[in-house]
Amino acid sequence: MIPEPAPTARSVSARPATEPGLSPSAGSSDGLTDPRATFTVLFVCTGNTYRSPLAERLLAARLGPDTRVRVGSAGTEAPWGDKMDRATRSVLTGLGGDARGFRPRLLTAELVAGASLVLGLERQHREAAVRLVPVALRRCFTLKEFVRLAEGDAGPGQGIDVVARAVARRGTVCAPRPADDDIADPWRESYDVLRRCGEDIDAVAVRLAALLSAERGPVVRL
């Protein structure tokens, strides 16, 4: 188990949180949809305990305060709780992220439908989102898969253009192994494993933020 700080135990009896786990710059209204946000990103992992909260808050930090991108996260088996896991918060703050206001929540069809881009931390999470909303297939990827496909030879662009670029390259630019598109679950591993997981996610979040850097404008305050 992750020793210090003590992690929150994962529960398989999932219940949604009463408030969404949105990045601080995105405001605090329910769901991901907001007419003042030009592009929304939803990260998905299993428990919404380690990987997807790190991805959500690290991307928000790398995008900066002037972004119009709205960022959130959810889990396919999210536990009932009202705050971020202590070990995750420790890793996040060490990497420069902000844990304030986070609450774990369960992945729902409404969340998938309201996102411009859904990024699973593993292939199973991408597939879970597609099962909930089959028509969202074209905007569901794993985090590593999306960045690999979207980068190509082009630079930053509007979010919708970056997604179209990734869709166009799908099936033509493959990872050496399918598992290379996954970020492994640090559950029941040591704190050092969680920290390295956070560093891995942050490295990809920096690349994703660069791809979405054209989405600039006034900070959304709700």
Image (cartoon, grey):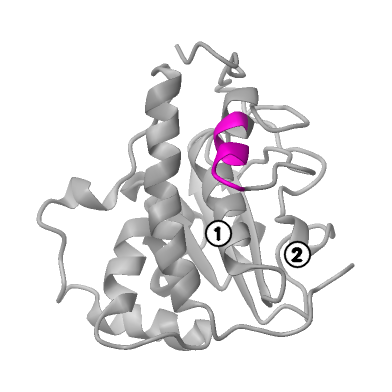
Query: Callout 2: helix, strand or loop?
Result: helix
Query: Looking at the image, is 112 positioned above or below residue 102?
Result: below
Say which of 128 and 75 sits in front: 75
Instruction: Kindly identify which numbered label has been placed on residue 59.
Output: 1
Query: Callout 1: helix, strand or loop?
Result: helix
Label 2 crowding class (10 Å Cα cut-off): few <14, some 14-19, many 20+?
Answer: many
Residue 181 placed where, x, y %?
26, 53
Foreground mark, 1 or 2, reads 1
The residue that appears at 40% across and 24% down in the rendered structure is 192
Question: Which residue sits furthest left?
Answer: 176
Q: Seen in the image, is 208 located left or right of residue 108?
A: left
- Location of mark 2 (residue): 26
Q: Quadrant of residue 1?
A: top left
Label 1 crowding class (10 Å Cα cut-off): few <14, some 14-19, many 20+?
Answer: many
The residue that appears at 37% across and 46% down in the rendered structure is 200
User: Magenta segment, principal secondary structure?
Assistant: helix
91 magenta-colored: yes
The residue that appears at 75% across and 64% down in the rendered structure is 26
